[in-house]
Image: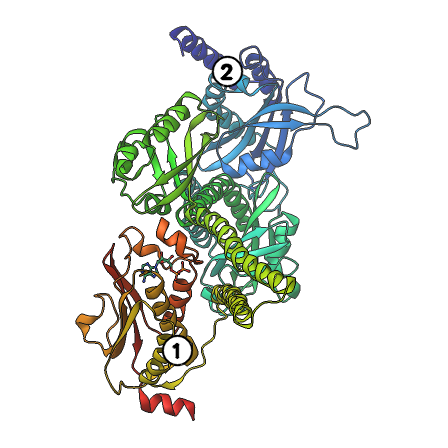
Amino acid sequence: MSVVAATELLALLGEATRILHATLPLEQRIQRLFELLRPVVHFRDARLICWLQGAQPKTERQQFYSADGWPYPWDDSLSRRVALDGALVLRQIAVSNPAAAGEHLPVVQAAYLGAPIRWDRRLWGLLELRAETRSTLEGTSRELVAALLPQLAVAIAQAGQSLPPAPIGASDGATPTGLTLAPPRLQHLLELEARLETMLNLPELLSLLLRQALAATGAEAGAVLLVDQSAGELLLHTAEGLPATPWHGLEAQQHKRFSWDHGLAGQAARMKRALLVRDVTLQPELAPGGTGARAGLAAPIVIHERVVAVMLLSSSRSNAFGDQELAFMRALCDRAALPLSRTLHYQDALESANYLGQVFNNLPTGLALLDTNGKVVRVNPAWTSIWGIKVPQRRDAFHVGLDLIEVMLPRLTEPLAVTEFCRKGQRLPSETLVLRVRLINPVQDLHILSVPTRDSQKRISGRLWVVTDVTREGEADRLKNEFVSIVSHELRTPLTSILGYTELLLSREFQPEERIQFIKTVYDEAERLSKLVEDLLSVSRIEAGRLKLNRWLNSLNSIVNELSTQLNTQLVVHRLLLDVTPNLPPVSIDRDKIKQVIFNLLNNAIKYSPKGGEITLEMLIATPTQLPPEHPPGRWIRVAIHDQGMGIAPDDLPRIWERFYRVDNTNTRRIGGTGLGLSITKAIVELHGGQIWAESELGQGSSFFFSLPMANVEKDTEMRK
Ligand code: ADP
């Protein structure tokens, strides 16, 4: 305020003091005061309510209005609130004429300033001003009004002295509205208000409110219930001193929902009004919480016309609560509304941040939030695991365009594409971009989606990288293509032979030897087809988890005998050597399936050593050094098939177990096959609880091994019984 303005204000106050202490009836003095203030404060109209207290214990309420008042009635509930709060109130209001009035006036936005005239712990009256805009009543106007209040109190006190004596037996001079609060309670409210301002924690806020309510009203028990207005339900949040029922075992009851159709709290919530039950025996339907409660008080906390909570107090004493307590609880709930609304919003924000955080952290898709410079703001665990890297603690120091590319450089097949992708993201900040990246060692295909992110003002705040590992999808594609090409080739070749030879046989007569030769070829090719169909069925059973074993105690030695007899007839350029420990302990196996495994491996050994050589079938009780380092401990039989064939290159070796995987070179192409045998073999061995592995050197031959657990004879025989 400027010096001039301050001097003017002081002069005005001097003038107001002179008017208020003039020897005129109070009404005239107030009118003059209003006239003095109007050109300075620019209010639209004003009202003074006062309670004149005479020498006798009697109080008289008088009201004075400024001239040229607005046609809208004054809102007495606002006045009551000012009286109750005991503090200056400045707020935006909507004024309208009551429906009963003849002419209808539009609803008008206005400002209201209400000031309680307090002196010597008493409320003497209220000075109220209304104006068209809030700014009119702010600042100097407000200060002026505040400065006038002591003068007004003195004027009202003096006017009371001149009241005529009251008739004998008039009632005690309790405050005229019944709404003034005793100073200690007011003190409670003022202190509370200051503390509520800074609170953001819901449980703390509610228990503070409850404790204040209990302390100020003398209630023995109380609770705060949150209200779900749309469901018509109450949710017990905080309770203190409540005896057993109906909220027995508060822990279990906490966050339990109650219908608001019953009880005092429910009714207060439904009616959006504070309710008082002086004696529950007279209104049993409104029993407050707790056994033995005689009196109850429930007050709703209302935010923008919505009830969000109800405070409930109870006492074992009937008439424990009266108008004073009711007024206090109303004032308390009123003051709690704003802080509670703020806390609920804060809690909501926390909840959703927490929820989103969980979603972010647990998504299997890699997510990275970047700022506009491409620096990492936040990443989820999937992001680091997909790239297989560690992001430093100080994430803002990690830049996708520089650091990520540098770390990933040894694995990126096209680093320049990634660099360009990052650059493009900065050049076109509002574009959504997509990139497919291939990593090597091991091979991994990634799909990167880079979408712009925006802040609450819709300004671009950076990018979100959504990284998905699509290796499996790529693999599925590859499998599908290989399946189609291999199967169609493997089908076509035998079919062509079968059709060719049968056609030949039908065309004319052949010598018996020739005929037998043709029919044998047709038979072999049909068998090849049947094996293909069988393999495909096995693969689909394995995939669906439907490959079942029919296990019995068996001797591997007897299987070897059967197989060698069967194979020896086929061997021309190869020699089959057997290195089998005699009388091997029994194993619990599906005999046919294990025969199929050994047969497959021997067949491959023959197939992939076209120049011939030795093929050794070896079986022994394995010592730990004869098993791979990561092999589980126990008693194992190891079966091995060694050949001196073409061998397998180190890059291919880990992949030969994949479905449809065939080492691709001129030799293998000529030999033919589906790439299914080893994958089926592996599945069968693993179903038996064993492991399969291979060692090989290109051009030097290969060794295939698998292990089978030795049977626990007693237990396995027991199971068979
Ligand atoms: P297929 O023999 O029908 O192609 P398999 O699943 O049995 O399918 O074998 C997969 C691949 O592993 C073969 O294509 C071959 O390249 C390689 N392979 C298997 N066994 C041997 C072996 N004993 N020596 C060299 N390569 C082999």
Residue 16 numbered tag: 2
Mark 1 neighbour density, 10 Å: few (under 14) some (14–19) many (20 or more): few
- Amino acid type shown at disc 1: Gln
Residue 107 in the image, given as x and y percentages of width and height: 70, 25
State whether residue 697 is above or below residue 363.
below
Q: Is residue 319 visible?
A: no
State the image quarter where residue 79 is shown.
top right
The one of 3 and 210 positioned closer to us in this rendering: 210
Please name the residue shown 34% across and 41% down the image: 439
Label 2 CB less than 8 angstroms from ligand 1: no
On the picture, is 65 further left or further right than 114? right
State whether residue 537 is above or below residue 424.
below
Measured in 3D between alpha carbons, the distance from the residue under mark 2 to the one under mark 1, in whole angstroms, is: 127 Å
Going by the picture, which residue comes out furthest to the left? 625
- Amino acid type shown at disc 2: Ala
Mark whose residue sits in front, 2 or 1:
1
Which quadrant holds the N terminus? top left
Please name the residue shown 54% across and 36% down the image: 83
State the image quarter where residue 679 is shown.
bottom left
Going by the picture, which residue comes out furthest to the top? 4
Residue 566 numbered tag: 1
On the picture, is 44 further left or further right than 214? right
The one of 354 and 159 positioned closer to us in this rendering: 354
